[in-house]
Image (cartoon, rainbow, N blue to C red):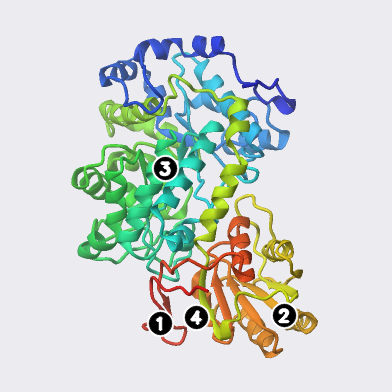
């Protein structure tokens, strides 16, 4: 292992072992923890003794997980300093820790935390050093949303895997476990010890605007098996997995980021449909569970979101399901949790409901002081805080943060984005692409008969730090497979002029591949496909997000579902089109008829092959 010196912009080099020991001496002495990194937590009496020596302000801080702008803990770019001052009232991550003693920090790409793996490791080390050098300093639990597919915060050159619905189409528990194991090892190498994944929601609503392909599918038994497998993979690599969004976000047509959804399931339907994946996660030893900002009247008729519901979080999750791990809120900046109460009441009510970690409040100073005031005025007892602080410290101890809070650059080099990991992602993706229509055995597409391919279609912003745009990635992959491929972006809402341009280009090609993205009945994308088919050229439609697109494309002679527009899934689709691999994915959700949504066009488990 080699250390890197302090880089430009103030990146923190990995501290020496002597620095680590000095910074953690008090905590280590208190815990006297020993054994491997994944050993059980030390004697609770030692953790309780640690809690007993903490000030009230330190206890309040341990319950918050906060965003902070910048690539460095001590010397971020000026624009990030300005953003921190505006939103948090501090300049840097180090100042955030000193002022509020927060127990966790969440990384985002948009906060410029995740430029590349070595920088991420430096940032993590800088955060740990800043916290551990404070009086009675504690290690920080660093987290992120690395679901893979369309939601990931750490992009290339880290390994990026197919998303949950693609994994659901593959149906392999061993693939889900391998995904968690490899992705967890890479996160841990960069100092990220808590991942807000997997999604345990059962997606039964095709109109769901926020979950969709982030879910493993519509069958609660299948979802449960894949959730448990992914949890085992992540936690076997020493990263806390997080099942979300309890009590279930799969049947809504409202996005809780921007509205307040209501789930109308009966208690019986909830037990049968929504609960099983969370039960499976708990049985698998899940370290943390994230709440949902939505109302479930059958579980709590108060009108409160689940995040603030004691009947749901304590009555059902804690007492009925027997879960005693960490409960973390979804982001407290989302509208679903802010619509009924003000930002000062939300964190207090969440703690009263049974939450342990308060994630990303819009105004940290307001939220932090609201909790402090609630304890001082008797609305919350200090014992209640101690219970949650103890859960957070148990998790930090289990993850080895008291013994080994720092990471080395050598570990990044050996682990992140290795050839073996990238090959594993490609192999998993090859088992997910789903062939739904193949009239006249158009696929696999013959290079001899159709050497010149035009790739057109939607080009949504590239997710997860992947290459993009989708048409370019597909054309590039087909080019590597021996076709002469040209990309022409037509967007998600092509105009008549754009369609005419694509049709003219299609007449010069031997075959057309069109990437579709959430096609609706009156959309320009549907008109595009119809007019491309009318040219007489063979047309292959690839649904690059929701598989439901196929119902809107009855004229297309071949249709594939890729479930996301990340590189790994698009490359897999290209290999299937070219016949390099056979399509093996099976629909994990049903596709209803476009003209009669009560009728199923393609059931769960449907998928063609060659």
Looking at marks 2 and 3 on the same chain, the residue that comes earlier in the sequence is marked by 3
Residues under numbered marks 1 and 4 in contact, where contact means CB atoms less than 8 Å apart: no
Q: Which residue is mark 1?
A: 597
Q: Real-space Cα distance between discs 1 and 3?
A: 37 Å
Labels 4 and 2 touching (C-beta < 8 A):
no
Q: State left or right for residue 115 relative to residue 321.
A: right
Q: Is residue 571 above or below residue 560?
A: above
The number of discs equals 4
Q: Position of residue 495 (x, y in %)?
A: 71, 79
Residue 260 vs residue 536: left or right? left
Q: Of circles 1 and 3, which is in front?
A: 3
Splitting the image into 4 quarters, where does residue 3 fall?
top right
Number of other residues with Cα within 10 Å of mark 1, as a class: few under 14, some 14 to 19, many 20 or more: few
Residue designated by label 4: 551
Counting residues from the start of the chain, the first of labels 3 and 4 encountered is: 3
In x, y percent, where is residue 476? 73, 62
Q: Answer whether labels 3 and 4 touch (C-beta < 8 Å).
A: no
| Residue 110 x/y as whole percent | 62, 45
Q: Is residue 316 above or below residue 16?
A: below
Of badges 2 and 3, the one in the foreground is 2
Looking at the rendered structure, the secondary structure element under dot 3 is helix
Foreground mark, 3 or 4, reads 3
Residue topped by disc 2: 449
Residue 56 visible to an observer of this rendering = yes
Say which of marks 4 and 2 sits in front. 2
Q: Depth check: give the residue in front, 552 or 442.
A: 442
Up-down: is 411 above or below 45? below
State whether residue 365 is above or below residue 43.
Answer: below
Residue at the disc numbered 3: 233
Task: Give the distance between the C-alpha atoms of the residues marked 1 and 4, in whole angstroms.
Answer: 10 Å
């Amino acid at each position: 292992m080699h250390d890197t010196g302090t880089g430009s912009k103030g990146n923190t080099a990995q501290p020496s072992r002597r620095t680590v020991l000095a910074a953690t001496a008090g905590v280590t002495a208190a815990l006297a923890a020993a054994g491997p990194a994944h050993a059980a937590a030390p004697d609770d009496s030692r953790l309780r003794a640690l809690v007993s020596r903490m000030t009230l302000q330190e206890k309040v801080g341990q319950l918050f997980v906060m965003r902070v702008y910048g690539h460095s803990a001590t010397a971020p770019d000026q624009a990030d300093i300005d953003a921190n001052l505006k939103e948090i009232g501090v300049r840097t991550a180090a100042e955030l820790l000193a002022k509020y003693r927060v127990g966790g920090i969440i990384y985002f790409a948009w906060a410029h935390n995740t430029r590349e793996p070595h920088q991420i490791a430096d940032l993590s080390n800088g955060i740990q050093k800043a916290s551990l050098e404070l009086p009675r300093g504690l290690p920080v639990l660093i987290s992120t949303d690395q679901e893979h597919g369309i939601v990931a915060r750490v992009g290339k050159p880290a390994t990026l895997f197919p998303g949950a619905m693609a994994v659901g189409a593959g149906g392999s528990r061993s693939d889900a476990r391998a995904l968690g194991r490899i992705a967890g090892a890479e996160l841990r190498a960069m100092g990220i010890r808590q991942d807000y994944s997997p999604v345990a929601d059962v997606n039964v609503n095709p109109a769901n605007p926020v979950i969709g392909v982030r879910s493993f599918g519509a069958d609660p038994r299948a979802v449960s098996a894949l959730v448990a497998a992914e949890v085992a993979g992540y936690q076997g690599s020493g990263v806390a997995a997080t099942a979300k969004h309890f009590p279930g976000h799969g049947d809504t047509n409202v996005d809780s980021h921007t509205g307040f959804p209501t789930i109308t399931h009966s208690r019986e339907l909830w037990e049968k449909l929504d609960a099983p994946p969370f039960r499976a996660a708990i049985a698998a030893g899940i370290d943390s569970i994230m709440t949902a900002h939505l109302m479930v009247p059958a579980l709590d008729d108060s009108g409160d979101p689940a995040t603030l519901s004691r009947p749901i979080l304590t009555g059902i999750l804690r007492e009925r399901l027997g879960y005693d791990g960490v409960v973390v809120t979804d982001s407290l900046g989302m509208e679903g949790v802010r619509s009924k109460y003000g930002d000062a009441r939300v964190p207090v009510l969440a703690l009263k409901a049974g939450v342990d970690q308060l994630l990303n409040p819009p105004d940290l100073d307001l939220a932090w002081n609201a909790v402090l005031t609630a304890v001082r005025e008797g609305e919350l007892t200090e014992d209640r805080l101690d219970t949650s602080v103890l859960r957070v410290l148990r998790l930090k101890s289990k993850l080895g943060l008291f013994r080994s809070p720092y990471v080395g650059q050598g570990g990044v080099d050996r682990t992140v984005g290795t050839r073996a990991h990238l090959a594993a992602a490609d192999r998993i993706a090859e088992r997910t692409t789903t062939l739904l229509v193949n009239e006249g055995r158009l696929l696999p597409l013959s290079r001899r008969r159709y050497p010149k391919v035009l790739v057109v279609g939607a080009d949504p912003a590239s997710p997860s730090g992947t290459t993009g745009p989708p048409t370019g990635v597909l054309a590039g992959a087909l080019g590597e497979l021996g076709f002469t491929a040209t990309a022409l972006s037509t967007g998600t809402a092509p105009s008549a002029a754009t369609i005419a341009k694509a049709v003219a280009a299609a007449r010069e090609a031997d075959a057309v591949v069109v990437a579709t993205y959430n096609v609706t009945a009156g959309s320009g994308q549907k008109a595009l496909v119809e007019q491309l088919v009318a040219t007489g050229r063979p047309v292959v439609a690839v649904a690059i997000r929701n598989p439901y697109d196929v119902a809107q494309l009855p004229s297309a002679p071949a249709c594939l579902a890729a479930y996301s527009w990340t590189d790994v899934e698009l490359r897999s689709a290209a290999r299937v089109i070219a016949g390099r691999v056979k399509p093996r994915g099976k629909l994990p959700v049903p596709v209803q008829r476009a003209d009669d949504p009560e009728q199923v066009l393609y059931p769960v488990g449907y998928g063609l092959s060659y």
